[in-house]
Structure formats: C-alpha cells, structure tokens
Image (cartoon, rainbow, N blue to C red):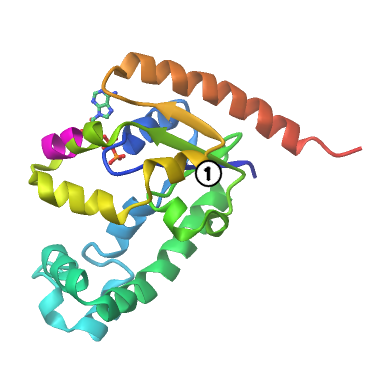
Amino acid sequence: MFSIGLTGGIGSGKTTVADMFSARGVTVVDADLIAHQITAPGGVAMPLIERAFGPDFVTADGAMDRAKMRARVFTDPAAKAQLESITHPLIRAESERQRSEARSAYHIVVVPLLIEAGERASKVDRILVVDCPVETQIERVIQRNGFPREQVLAIIARQATREARLAAANDVVVNDSAATLQTLQREVDLLHARYIEMAAAESKPHT
Ligand code: ADP
C-alpha cells in the first residue's frame, strides 16, 4: 500500500500537518504516539521496562516515569540502548499492524527521526519533510513546551540538520513563520490530491 513518511525537526509542524491529512480521511500512524501508548499504564512495554530498570522507573499508576527515564538515558548510552531494545520492536510491530489495517487510498507514517534512523528503515514510498528555519523551531518549542532555549538547542543539535532532511525529501511542506494554518492547509490539500493519484497509479496492474 502506498505510504508517505512524514518527518521534520522538533517544532517544525509534523503533528499539525499530520492532523490535516487525518482530517481528510488519511490513516496516520504516529510512532511517537505508539511509543507513548506502550509506556502508559497497562502498556505492553511496562512489564519489560520494570524488569529491566526496576520499580523506580514506574509511576504509582503503572506508567513509565518519563522524567526519571529521560534523565537516566541522557547520561547513560547503555541504558538508552536497553530501553530502545524493548520499545523499538514493539513500536515497529504496532506500527505495522496499523499500516496493514489502513483503508485509505494511501497512509502516512509520522517518523520524527526518519532521516536519523536511515531512510530505508521506515519502508515508505515517499518522504515528506515539514520544513522551517531553526529559529522558528526554537520559538515554537519554547512556546509549546516552556523549555529553556538551551534545552531546545540541545535537542535540535541531536537531530539531523535541516539540509540533510531536505536532501532526503521527495516533497516539502514549507511551514515557516510566514505560513498560516490556511496556507498550510492549501499545501496539504495539493499534496493529498497528488498522493491519491500516485496511489491509484501504483495499484493499477502492470501490463
Ligand atoms: P512537531 O510535531 O513537528 O513537533 P507541532 O505540529 O506540534 O510540531 O508544531 C509545534 C507548535 O507550533 C505547535 O504548538 C503548533 O500548534 C504550532 N504551529 C505549527 N505550525 C504552525 C503555523 N503554521 N501557525 C501557527 N502555529 C503553528
């Protein structure tokens, strides 16, 4: 089935763009959302996380203690690798399940670290990058999360560069500070029409 990998730096507008496709009836599979769900109370990753890291990393209601885990993996690469060895296969399996159940003409997979993970790993037909200048990212994330500027800069420094993302892109949505939700919606609708055509061409039997 025809699939689009949607990516972009933190604060670029991935969620905003994904929601616009979703409102047009496109199935959106969101790796971050799945990561959240499997580490929520009763999530499938929780017994494994508790066994590997101990009850200190589990909150009273049975979710992963995100703040504690973030602090731990930030300073300890082995712990990061261990956490990822638990979560990544579960995220991949759930993502595959949702993709196989998609009933729209094409579907979108939101993968924040698509470029960092290697483009081929995400198994998508096209890469759609939501692009904006770094300064816009910083302003949005400060506004949205209330993080100090240094923290936003540190996150951005660990992600792929804007140039690397653009080099890998098949399609680009420009979401800079001049973009309004209306102009963004127009770009999404143009892409949506093109993707429906591409998906139809793809599903035609080859003669
Ligand atoms: P990401 O998912 O890439 O981190 P979001 O879609 O959450 O980014 O966008 C970051 C923040 O900026 C959100 O609070 C969102 O509402 C806001 N935002 C994104 N694009 C626009 C835009 N074109 N106009 C106004 N606000 C925007």
Residue drawn 31% across and 63% down?
38
Rendered location of residue 93, percent (x, y):
48, 64
Instruction: Locate residue 195 relative to residue 184 in the image: left or right.
Output: right
| Quarter of the figure that contains the N terminus | top right
Q: Quadrant of residue 120?
A: bottom right
- Residue 34 inside the magenta-drawn segment: no
| Quarter of the figure that contains the C terminus | top right
* Helix, strand or loop for disc 1: helix
- Residue 143 inside the magenta-drawn segment: yes
Q: Determine whether the beta carbon of the residue marked 1 sits less than 8 angstroms from the nearest atom of ligand 1.
A: no
Residue drawn 52% across and 39% down?
169
Range covered by the magenta-colored residues: 139-144
Q: Furthest-right residue in view?
A: 207
Image height of 75 relative to 21, above or below: below
Rendered location of residue 193, percent (x, y):
58, 21
Instruction: Locate residue 191 relative to residue 81 in the image: left or right.
Output: right
Query: Residue 170 versus residue 65: which sits nearer the camera?
Result: 170
- Mark 1: few, some, or many residues within 10 Å (few <14, many ≥20)? some
Q: Is residue 47 visible?
A: no
The total of numbered circles placed on residues is: 1
Q: Quadrant of ligand 1?
A: top left
Query: Residue 24 versus residue 152: which sits nearer the camera?
Result: 152
Residue drawn 15% across and 73% down?
58
Q: Main secondary structure of the magenta part?
A: helix
Residue drawn 33% across and 76% down?
81
- Residue beneath disc 1: 168
Amino acid at pointer 1: Ala
Q: Is residue 56 visible?
A: yes
Rendered location of residue 34, percent (x, y):
35, 56
Instruction: Locate residue 105 relative to residue 98 in the image: left or right.
Output: right
Rendered location of residue 62, percent (x, y):
16, 70
Image height of 21 relative to 92, above or below: above
